Amino acid sequence: MKTNVEDTNTIQEIKKLKEQLLECQEHSKNHLELLEKVVSIAELNNDGKILDVSLAYEKLTGYTKKEVIGSKASIPSGIEKILKDVTQDIIEGELEQVTKDGRESWVKSILVPMTDDNGNKIGSMNVIFDITDKKKFERMSIKDSLTNLYNRRHFDDVLHREILRAKRDKKMLAFTILDIDNFKKYNDSYGHMAGDTVLQTIGDLLNKSMHRSSDFAFRLGGEEFGLIFSDTLEDHALPFVDGIRTKIQNLNIDHSLNGTVKVVTASFGLLIVDFSKEDVDKNGFYSMADHALYEAKSNGRNKVVLHSHSEEDLDFF
């Protein structure tokens, strides 16, 4: 009798364990299905080719699993470069990509190495998070709402960063401050809405004039703008800045109270520092360019003044 009771208890325990196992399997299945739907994952081989993707990945990129498996073309731009650096460490980065329908988006990509039983790398798991809204907010926080140029807050960050870069690489760094001539008189005469249009027009011109990734245009406040550009010789920087001055004058925007020119013009203070020979901090950079701007405005406006360490050697253009 005792044996039968023990057998019965054992059978019941086995049944209970089976039920728990089935329940766990069901939970695991549900969890995997949930992950499949909400987490964008692409499984890559060592060559960066896609072996498999989740449903969430398909939704994020617009590409179906059938379209991307075996292909490298649909993975985020720049992932190939990161992929080559992956060994045993997790690598992450923010990447810009284009969806199937042509929509630009930003993703945070985390590459997790996959290894076999012997520890050999056989591929990577690419986990992707959509951060487009985050990047849009970041752009808004560093842009001037009227001109769409970078704002003063971002100027401080960029100038500090570019000075450090120029020091490290022992390169040239140029900074110019420009100020619209007699702008208060323009606002008083033509109205603030017309003044805003002038600011937007000049902002657009400055933005289009800065072509390289190391070129930056800012609205520093009011009618004052700033330009930072690197690795440029004096012989190139002066004609470049004076060319922008000429372009502003050639916009031919009426300004009857702007001296004899009668159109909107701007004055420029330019500073060029060769960090292989000298060292200037952020405050010095701004104050020296601002001093050159003061000289430009004090000597007739609508000109570029290059700052020199000796006031007698100020150059006017």
Image (spheres, rainbow, N blue to C red):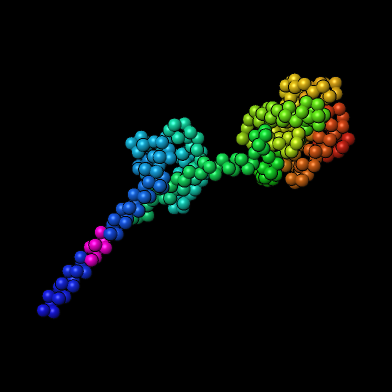
- Name which quarter of the figure residue 207 lies in: top right
| Res. 76 in view | yes
Q: Nearer the viewer, residue 249 or 315?
A: 249
Identity of the residue drawn at 88% across and 35% down: 312
Q: Position of residue 103 (x, y in %)?
A: 48, 33
User: Looking at the rendering, in which quadrant would you find the C terminus?
Assistant: top right
Q: Residue furthest bottom?
A: 2
Point 81% across, 29% down: residue: 188
Q: Position of residue 268 (x, y in %)?
A: 78, 31
Give coordinates of residue 291: x percent, y percent: 83, 38
Examine the residues drawn in magenta and state their main secondary structure.
helix
Viewer-nearest residue: 268 or 40: 40
Above-or-below relation of 17 to 66 = below
| Residue that sits furthest to the right in the current view | 312
Rendered residue at 69%/30% (across/down) = 200
| Magenta stretch, residue numbers | 16-22
Where is the N terminus found, in terms of image quarters? bottom left
Q: Is residue 108 left or right of residue 227?
A: left
Q: Is residue 35 above or below residue 228?
A: below
Q: Is residue 312 magenta?
A: no
In this orientation, which residue lies closer to the viewer: 82 or 169? 82
Q: Quadrant of residue 217?
A: top right
Q: Nearer the viewer, residue 78 or 135?
A: 135
User: Along the horizontal axis of the image, is 182 left or right of 51?
Assistant: right
Can residue 308 be seen here?
no
Magenta-drawn stretch contains 18: yes
